[in-house]
Amino acid sequence: MSRSLKKFSLKYQYLKLELEEAEQQAEDFNLEWNKLFGKYFVDKNSEMWVNEETGEIRKDKPSKEEKKHKKIPNKIRKLYKKLSTFTHPDKGGSPEEFQLLKSAYEEQDLIEMLNLAGRYNIDYKIEEEDKIALDKICTHLEKKTEQVTSTLAYTYFTKSIKHKKAVIQMLEQQYNITIDKKDYPKELLEDT
């Protein structure tokens, strides 16, 4: 494995772990958030839609966005075929590893595919266009993490009391509601 590929691989692994940690925290924060403020968004006569990625709560059903089929470069397609001969359950591979390969291929996650190639000693010559693709993958993970950590619930539970009060004010303004002081967490009442 080349030095530049190792660097991308390590960066990718770090960013992937960072995203997983942020998503787990966001899930915990969303549960707590709903305990604190969920009742202010419940209308017994309507349904609420929750975006699992961002934690956004909406009254209207989100429109379905069709995934655009990206043209997969021939080089990646060839790597996928080569890797599938090692990872496919019918060829002696595990279902988990094959699913990992399939997901990586569909997402055009070259780093994950190259990590699998490394396990099976499959050579892959990294060209300049590959480095650009690898960098895009890392940037995508960074953006996803930023998206998760910029939600109101995440901000509320990770920032200062001043930020928590600002989040509550923002909720009241955006949704035209008044959050009863008795529902404020103790720490916010002590600071007033």
Image: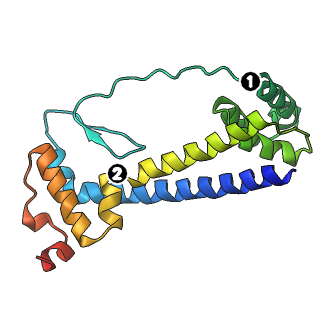
Q: Is residue 173 left or right of 17 when viewed as pictured?
A: left
- Mark 1 secondary-structure assignment: loop
Q: Residue furthest bottom?
A: 190
Is 91 in front, or is 116? Answer: 116
Q: Secondary structure at mark 2?
A: loop
| Callout 2 crowding tier (Cα within 10 Å): few <14, some 14–19, many ≥20 | some
Question: Residue sitting at 81 percent across and 27 percent down?
Answer: 75
Give the alpha-carbon distance from disc 2 to disc 1, as whole Å.
35 Å
Name the residue located 56 percent from the left edge and 42 percent from the top edge: 140
The numbered mark at residue 141 is none
Q: Position of residue 56 (x, y in %)?
A: 31, 43
Q: Position of residue 76 (x, y in %)?
A: 77, 29
- In the figure, 36 relative to 189: above or below? above
Q: Can you give x and y, in whole percent of width and height, for residue 3 in the image?
A: 83, 54
The residue carrying mark 2 is 151
Which residue is the site of mark 1?
A: 73
Q: Looking at numbered disc 1 in the image, what kind of residue is underneath it?
A: Pro
Quarter where residue 131 is shown: top right
Q: Is residue 103 left or right of residue 4?
A: left
Closer to the camera in the image, 185 or 141? 141
Left or right: residue 35 compared with residue 72: left
* Total count of labels: 2
| Place of residue 108 in the rendered image (x, y in percent of width and height, measured from the top left) | 67, 32
User: Looking at this view, is 21 or 14 the one in front?
Assistant: 14
When asked about the image quadrant of residue 97, the answer is top right
Of discs 2 and 1, which sits in the foreground? 1
Q: Residues within 10 Å of mark 1 (few under 14, many from 20)?
A: few
Cβ atoms at labels 2 and 1 below 8 Å apart: no
